[in-house]
């Protein structure tokens, strides 16, 4: 599985924001369900205004239950 360029660029931006101390955790409402989400945002400036760019939200509950890691063998490759 290959990570797309836009995801790599967003991750690089997130790393720069973290290194510069420009991250925020904001409570937002999910646009579809209205449920509370805790969103990781990069913080920038536009003149005297702050600009918050959302990157994703923290997983509810146990994140190990929410995600499955990539398999060691791609579907179209023979097993080792």
Image (cartoon, rainbow, N blue to C red):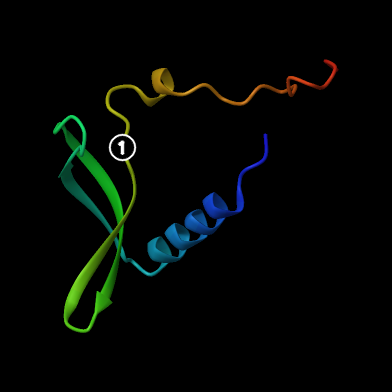
Q: Position of residue 39 (x, y in %)?
A: 26, 45
Which of the pair 63/1 is nearer the observer? 1
- Looking at the image, which residue is at 39% across and 64% down? 17
Q: Quadrant of residue 18?
A: bottom left
Q: Which residue is mark 1?
A: 58
Placement of 40 over or under 80, stated as above or below: below
Side of 58 where 3 appears, left or right? right
Numbered circles on residues, count = 1
- Looking at the image, which residue is at 62% across and 26% down? 70
Q: Which quadrant, please, contains the N terminus?
A: top right
Placement of 2 over or under 25, stated as above or below: above
- Looking at the image, which residue is at 67% across and 40% down? 2
- Looking at the image, which residue is at 74% across and 24% down? 74
Q: Residue furthest bottom?
A: 47
Which of the pair 11/32 is nearer the observer? 32
Side of 27 where 1 appears, left or right? right
Q: Residues within 10 Å of mark 1 (few under 14, many from 20)?
A: few
Q: Position of residue 34 (x, y in %)?
A: 14, 33
Placement of 17 over or under 11, stated as above or below: below
Q: Which quadrant, please, contains the C terminus?
A: top right
Q: Position of residue 8 (x, y in %)?
A: 56, 53
Q: Quadrant of residue 76?
A: top right
Label 1 secondary element: loop
Side of 3 where 53 appears, left or right? left
Q: Position of residue 38 (x, y in %)?
A: 22, 41
């Amino acid at each position: 599985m290959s990570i797309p360029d836009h995801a790599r660029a967003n991750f690089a931006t997130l790393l720069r924001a973290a290194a510069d101390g420009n991250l925020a955790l904001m409570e937002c409402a999910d646009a579809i369900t209205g449920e509370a989400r805790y969103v990781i945002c990069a913080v920038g400036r536009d003149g005297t205004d702050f600009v918050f760019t959302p990157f994703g939200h923290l997983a509810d509950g146990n994140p190990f239950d929410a995600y499955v890691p990539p398999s060691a063998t791609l579907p179209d490759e023979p097993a080792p």
